[in-house]
Image (tube, rainbow, N blue to C red):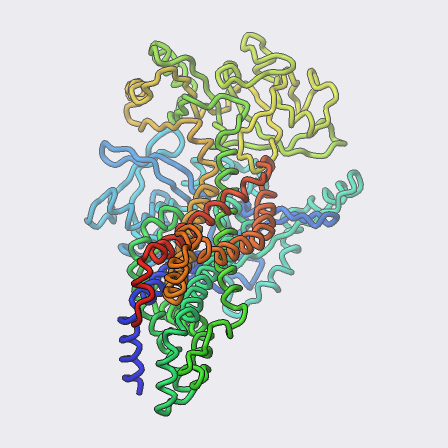
Amino acid sequence: MIRNYLLIALRNFRKYKAFTLINLLGLSIALACTMLIYLFVAHEFSYDDFHTHKDRIYLIVSYEQHLDSSAVDYTIAQPYPLGPALLEDMPEVERFVRITYGRKRFVQKDDEVFEEEIAYADSSLFTVFSLPMRYGNADYALTKPNAIAISEKAAKKYFGEANPLGQTLSIRIGSEFEDYEVTVVFEDIPSNSILRSDFFLPMMKETLGKSASYINDPDQDAWGVSAYMTYLLLQENASASALEDKLLVLRNKYYPTEADYLTKREEEFGEKIKRNFHLQKLTGIHLDAEIISSTSSKPIYSYILSGIAGCILLLASINFTLLAISRSNSRAKEVGIRKVVGARRSQLIVQFWGEAILTSILALLLAFLISGLALPMFNEMSQKDLSFATLFQPLSFTVLLGLTLFTGIIAGAYPSLLLAGLNTLSVFKNKISTRKSGALPQVLMATQFVLPVIFLTITTVMIEQLNYMRHKDLGFQTAQILVINNNTTAQAQTFVRFSQLANQQKEVRQITATDAAFTKSGIAYYMRKSEEEQLQFVWAYHVKPNFFNMLDIQIVQGRAFDENIASDSTDAMIVNGAFVKALDLADPIGEEVEGSTIIGIVEDFHFQSLEGEIEPVAFYLPKQRHTLDYMLVQLQSNNLPESVSALSGIWKEIAPDLPFQYSFMDEDMQALYEDDARWTSILQWISGLSVFIACMGLIGVMGLTVAKRTKEIGIRKVLGASVSSLLLLLSRDYIKLILIAFGVAIPIANYCITEWLQNFAYRIEVQWWLFAIPGIVILLIAAISVSSQTFKAAKRNPVDSLRYE
């Protein structure tokens, strides 16, 4: 019987080629989208899931909870002694490992110098985390001060295919290069891990002290500096919640003055604050943006994409249902004959349902091909390294197969019940009609276009907001500003020498220097006017005097820096308007804040993303201890590559052993919106595919409708109907349904875009045309789809239409 069902299904596929093709295309594209989204979501929710002890590994997080407002501030950086203290005081802790943030450092091998991200870690790194060894013994990986552990990728880069154990790499820590011996090579860390570095140096005082002098200084309190991520491996039967309850005792032991400080803040400022440690499970870190905002992902994106995948599958299922309903007349006699020869209703249901499921399975096979071809582009858009092989893992394949079967069941449910329920006598009297299905086809047709209108409207708004952010006047000059990394050890001397040579180039207008270049780095402090005032978060930049003139930052009150005035180099500051407002300064010029006197106020400018309000900024002249990490060069030549090449030559003359690293400031500012651009691009593709699937269904339905009304069209032509009137007659009902869909979609789209725009401090105003454009686009596409089918019928010779078959 199954063989019989299969043969009938294949014959029907061959007989109704257009119907089959439309269903296959719609379902396969929908399933391909689902596969890509599944890869993304599975990747997001599988972070650090590969570690053997994943359920026992926790990150120590400090938190400050404001009891009045319920606001909580988290800090993952912890003091150097915290790990050993936890191991000693808490029996629940089996091991700990401290890891520093990865920091860019220069690595030299032979005559080549590269910049790599290098972190420090305890020797327990490879026993707490599951990082398999390619070469070497994990127990001795980071047990010597001059040891280094590198990934397999790094080993191939520096040593080729040879075993690198015992080989050395020269790394610049501080002002000089030092040799480190490769003791282990570990397999590349998977992309779905919060551990990112390919190089680890030992977390030992002999090594760490070269870049953190306080570690070896007995007069420094190591508990006062937080710079280390501390992970705990708990004992087999230890309770994380029970341990967390005990951490306040440990905090009071090692921060004995903190309780008095918090009590004083409550008495003086009325602030009720609670501070303690929190245990964050390893596998939950990536999806908790409150813990690590810089590298974490918001799970809402995964939920949104999952919802979109469901919507795309729904569109394809609606297509299938609509086409099956429209085709019911053509299969009515088949049903009647089968019933006459004894087919039961249940057998007919199985047959039609089987065809739907078989179509879904064929679409699944085609979807694997489409998703495989589209994966490189999707990886580029999503900035992921997703593997196609993941789809063939047992769990993934089972999920996809189950989803495919479910889609087939849903898509074939109503058509199967409709066709199997046809009355035999009515069939042979030609008294059947799809009208018995009620308003369902109209509802499905309208629903089919609701989703594309929503997607297209949201995409239009996202594009407009992105263009607004990219082209808004930032309040300072960014065009043709070259940002050069001053990565030498004698930065002040390098700047002087580089300036002398660069100013001889006709393409160079002027050059300045700073310790931070806005998007690349920055340091912030808490400041206040007096002890009685509330602390305010302030960005601090140390800049050369011509910094403001070069970037065209307007000084609206007071004056600029003058190196000839001694006090400007010691205790002067220039602030922005946001600083004045935040600290509530009525007469800011001459006001003293944190030991510095305000001598000037610059107009507010957008040095960060437009997602947030302009934050307070304080500028200082560089002092002896401050770095000049970046040199800014204003170019006037239209031939920028030639200018960059000339400056590169100057750099090679000054620092021949170091790479010339640069970027353009306007590109750096644009990079702030890479995430928004990426999601806009993804939604553009989704919108296009949803419109395509909806229109494919519309073309199929119109084709079947026209076929049923062939004689009617012939009669109307004989009676004098024009082609245009026939086009209007055949398409008006569908255009009406699309207009209804537009009316339903607009409120939903408006709610979505309003909520999304709330994330931006500076945003576009939602205008009527942002809704009109998507509606007009879809209406035109739908009209073209309908006309393509109706025009051929309307132009046909009425003799052919009326000829008896």
| Residue 606 spot, x, y in % from top left | 55, 28
Residue 128 seen from this side: no
Depth check: give the residue in front, 559 or 226. Answer: 559
Residue closest to the eye, 347 or 568 = 347
User: In this picture, is 641 found above or below 299?
Assistant: above
In this rendering, the answer to whether 265 lies above or below 559 is: below
Q: What x and y, as percent, mark residue 66?
A: 70, 47
Q: Residue 101 location in percent, x, y?
A: 46, 43
Q: Is residue 245 visible?
A: yes
Residue at 69% across / 30% down in the picture?
582
Residue 440 versus residue 576: which sits nearer the camera?
440
Q: Please indicate whether residue 796 sits to the left or right of residue 780 in the image.
A: left
Along the horizontal axis of the image, is 232 left or right of 250?
left
Name the one closer to the observer, 773 or 131: 773
Is 760 on the left or on the right of 510, as rendered?
A: right
Q: Residue at x 42, y 17 (%)?
A: 634
